[in-house]
Amino acid sequence: MNKEELKKVLTDPEFQNLVKKVSSVSLIFTLAMLVVYYAFILLLAYGKEFLGQPLSEGSATTVGIPIGIGVIVAAWMLTGLYVYWANKNYDPMVKQLREKFRR
């Protein structure tokens, strides 16, 4: 691709719209994961007593274990949601742009 073709792609409104959508969605998912992760870190720092409580009388498992597992599951879920979004929205838009500029 030469400079003229590249400039044509970069200035295309559809391409710019795609970049904005990807940036927005990526930012939302990044912020969601940061909130989950840092909430857990803050809970570790300031809620040790709460996290150290057993789940039930005589249990060796503490409240912190399922919460920690929840952080991991949240990361998986957010990744899955992003992949779903990308498959449903991003990939068709990229395909459409590729076809547009192959002509």
Image (cartoon, rainbow, N blue to C red):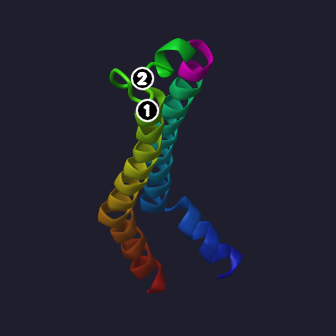
Residue 45: say if magenta: yes
Check disc 2 and report its element: helix, strand or loop: loop
Place of residue 73 in the rendered image (x, y in percent of width and height, measured from the top left): 40, 46
Residue 22: say if magenta: no
Q: Please, what is the three-letter code of the amino acid marked with disc 2?
A: Pro
Residue with the mark numbered 1: 61
Start-end of magenta stretch: 42-46
Q: Which of 23 and 79 is in front in this view?
A: 79
Check disc 1 and report its element: helix, strand or loop: loop
Q: Which of 18 and 51 is in front in this view?
A: 51
Residue furthest bottom as drawn: 103
Q: Is residue 27 above or below residue 90?
A: above
Residue with the mark numbered 2: 54
- Residue at screen point 46% across, 35% down: 65
Q: Which of 21 and 74 is in front in this view?
A: 74
Report how far apart the C-alphas of labels 2 and 1 lie in the structure.
6 Å
